[in-house]
Amino acid sequence: MKDQHPSRRHFLGSLAGCGTLAGLGACAASRAAAGNGTAAPEHDRTWSNPPSTAKKLEDVELTPPNGLNLIVLISDTFRWDYLHFNGNDRIRTPNLDALAADGVYFSNCYADGLPTIPSRRVMHTGRSILPERTKWHPLWPEDVTLAEVAGRAGMRTGFVVDTYHHFKPSMNFHNAFDSWIWIRGQETDRWVSGPKESVRPEDHVPAHLLRDNENLRRNMIQYLLNTRGRTGEEDYFCARSLDASARWLEQNSGGGRPFLLFVDMFDPHEPWDAPPRFQRLYRERYPFERTLFGYGVRNADIRESDLPYLIDLYSAEVTFMDHCLGRFFDRLKSMKLWENTVIVFSTDHGTHLGEQGCVQKHAGLLNSCVARIPLIIRHPEGRAAGRKIDAFASHLDFMPTFLDLVGVRGYERMDGRSLWPLVTGERESLRERVVTGYGNFGAVRTRRWHYFQNIWGDSPGHGPSLYDLEQDPGETRNVAGRHPKTVENLRAILSSEFRTEIG
C-alpha cells in the first residue's frame, strides 16, 4: 500500500493551522430544530431519530435464536489501514489477518456518529444520532438495545469492558446485560488515587509536550498511578479484558443456551503504551525507556521529529491488541466454541497520525483515517470465507446484522439494515452514500466524492473540503473550488441528514 503519511514539509506547514483543533469536537450549547432553525429543547427525544412506525420491543413477537453464539469485539481507535491484510506491509496483525481470511471483511464501513459514547449508542441500538450533533449522554429510557432484544429472545448476555466511559456517572450501557465486568484503570479512570508524588510524567513524556499543559500532566499522573502495579503482559488492559471474557465463557457457555458476549476494549486508544517487545518490533530506541503518548497533547506542541516514533507507538499498540486477540481465539478453540460462534471485530473510529498536521482524532478533519472503520465478521460455517464486500456499510447496520446472524427476528425499530444479504448475493448494495457526524462537523461520502464541513459554529476546521476519490483516494487535495455544483448537492444532503440549514 502506498504510504499515506504526510511529507515532512506538509506536516510542518499544517501544524500551525491545527493547533486549535483539539477543542473542535466539543458540542455547542444549543442546536437547531428540524426544518426551521429554532432551538430544540434538550428533552426532545424525537430529535435523536425520526419518529418510527415500527413496533417497540414489548409489542413484537421475537423468533427464537438459531443456536449460534455471538461475540462482538470492539477495539477503540483502530485505523482501518493499520491491518496487514489491507495492504499495510509494515504493520503486523497476523491474527486479524487470519480472522479476515476465515470471514468476511466489509471494506467500506463508516461511523454514523463519533467519538466513543455516541458511536456506542449507534452500535447498541441500530439508531442514528446524527441530528443531535453526536452528544455524549446515556441511552434514553425508550432506547432498545442489542442485549435487550437478544435477552428477550432467550440468549444469555454478557458485557466485558475496559472502556471506562461506559461507567461514568449516569451512563447505563450495561443495564440490559445479564452480567457485566468492568476492568478498571484505563486512561484517566479515577481508579488509583495516589500517592501522586510517586510518579513523574517527565520520565515518560518529552518536555515540549508537557510544557504548560496541566491537563496532559494530570492525565499522565492518573494513568501512571493506574498502571504502577503491572508486572507482565498479562496485566495490560486488553489482556485483562480478554482473559475476563474467556472466564465468562467458561462459566456461561454451557447448558444449550446460546450467548451474546460484547467485549469493548479501549486499546489502541491513547495512551500508547504497549509492552516493550512489541514496541521494539517497530523501532529499537524511543525517547524514554517507557515512552508514553497520552490524550490531550496539543498539536501545536508536536515537532516534526516526534511523528515517526508516535506512529511506531501506535503501531505497537495495534500489534499487541492483535496478539491478545490471538490468545483469546486459541481459548475459544480449546473450549470448542469456534465451531458454533459468530465472531465480529470492529472499532468506533480511527485517528490522525499526521494527516494535514493532525495527531489524535479531530472533528475538523473528518476524513477516512477517522471515519472509516474495519469490520470483520466470521461465520462458524465458513460462509463466504475470505470475501471482501465493497458496498457501503455503517455502525447503523451492526445491530440488525447481528440479530439476523443469530436468527432473532421481529424487532425492526432500527435505522440500519442487515449486511448479510450483501454476503449471500441477495443485495448488491444497501445505500448510495454514508454520512458521519462528529461534534460540529458532518461528512458525506459517495462512490466518487467525499465532502465535509462544519454544520454548526463558526470554526471551519480543515473544511469545507471536497475530495475526488477516483483521482485522490488518500484525500489529500481539496477540490471544492473546482466543483461548486457537487459541493451544493452534497451540502444539501448534510442539511437533510442533520435537519438544519447549513450556511
Image: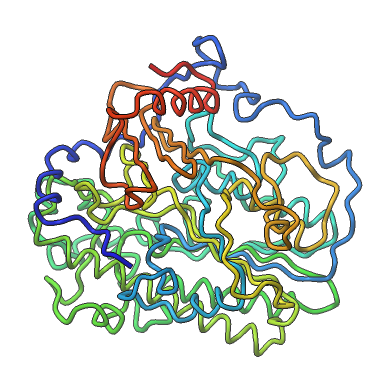
Can the viewer see residue 176? no
Of residues 474 and 165, the one nearer the viewer is 474
Residue 5: x and y, percent?
A: 23, 59
The answer to which image quadrant residue 125 occupies is top right
Residue 321: x and y, percent?
A: 43, 73
Vertical position of residue 158 compared to residue 302: above or below = below
What residue sits 8% from the left and 54% below the top? 208
Of residues 24 and 29, the one nearer the viewer is 24
- In the rendered image, the quadrant that contains the N terminus is bottom left
Q: Relative to residue 74, is residue 68 drawn left or right?
A: right
Of residues 262 and 387, the one nearer the viewer is 387
Q: Relative to residue 15, is residue 267 drawn left or right?
A: right
Vertical position of residue 314 compared to residue 213: above or below = below
What residue sits 62% from the left and 42% below the top? 431
What residue sits 47% from the left and 30% below the top? 133
Vertical position of residue 385 compared to residue 55: above or below = below
